[in-house]
Amino acid sequence: QPPLRILWLLILPTLFFYLLLTGDALATRRAFYALLITISLCLIRRRIESLNLLYALAFLFLVFEPLALWQPSFLLSFSGVLGILLWQQPLSQLLQVCPRWSQYLLQLFCISLAAFISTLPAVVFIFHMFAPAGLLCNLIAIPMVSFAALPMGLAGLLMSTVFPAGGDLLLRAAAWVLGLVVDIAGFASELPGLFSRALFLTLPETLAVLLTCLSLLMVLKRKRALFLLIPAVSLLLFV
């Protein structure tokens, strides 16, 4: 069995190909650079906390691209990963008491909830939109895209160079899965209580949403984070 350091090196070219395939998208670039730093640390046998790695990566992004701070892709990408990392370890401990068959669904829902909460301030501030249907849709969309649409799409692209008919078939299948995901999302967004709402908040209200979300994300690690709700409520009541 090859050592872990070699496995990381084998994964790197695949992720670089995917980076080129996505047009150097910011989220893919973040994953590629994170893997590159992780490989470098593995080669020198150093360990680093995941949160510290994310902070360093965000800092380096802003050093070379300061205007990225105002790009929705930067805010949504890094804030989503931040929420997942803040909840990952506490959730893994809490879910150990649950039946094994339910742990995957519960973990998927909780991770989706963490990403939803962490990106909510940016979504409300930039897009003026609140879409609770995303929590339900992610339970279906993430497995369908990760285990069906994405593998078939990548395999179809590779196969189209040597076997065009087979590649076309796989790409059509991937497109059908993605279309099904869109239809499911459209159906879920029309259910009572899950339809999207337009929100045009004032600056104090947006800050209150930000403080509330930070409190919910950090409370699993630090109970004192609930004190962030005090200035949040104060902004809503007195400003």
Image (cartoon, grey):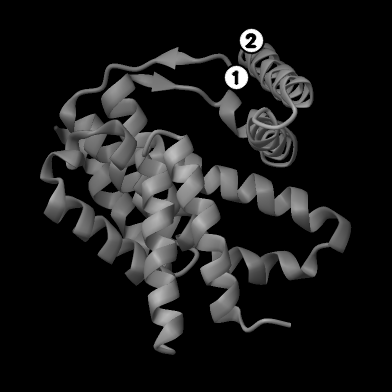
Residue 118 visible in the current orientation = no
Tell me which amino acid carries mark 2: Glu
| For residue 34, side relative to residue 174 (left or right) | left
Query: Pointer 1 and pointer 2: residues touching (CB < 8 Å)?
Result: yes
Q: Identify the residue shown where x is 65% and y is 72%.
A: 93
Alpha carbon separation for disc pair 1 and 2: 7 Å
Residue 214 x/y as whole percent:
35, 52
Residue with the most extreme bottom position:
45
Label 2 element class: loop
Q: Quadrant of residue 203?
A: top left
Q: Quadrant of residue 143?
A: top right
| For residue 166, side relative to residue 191 (left or right) | right
| For residue 47, side relative to residue 72 (left or right) | right
Between 20 and 138, the one nearer to me in the picture = 20
Between 51 and 159, the one nearer to me in the picture = 159
Residue 92 x/y as whole percent:
65, 67
- Vertical placement of residue 81 versus 191, above or below: below
Q: How crowded is mark 1: few (under 14 residues within 10 Å), some or many (20 or more)?
A: some
Tell me which amino acid carries mark 1: Leu
Q: Identify the residue shown where x is 13% and y is 55%.
A: 63
Q: How many marks?
A: 2
Residue 62 x/y as whole percent:
17, 51
Q: Mark 2 points at which residue?
A: 190
Where is the N terminus found, in terms of image quarters?
bottom right
Q: Name the residue under label 1.
A: 194
Q: Identify the residue shown where x is 64% and y is 17%.
A: 182
Q: How crowded is mark 2: few (under 14 residues within 10 Å), some or many (20 or more)?
A: few
Where is the C terminus found, in terms of image quarters?
top left
Q: Identify the residue shown where x is 33% and y is 35%.
A: 73
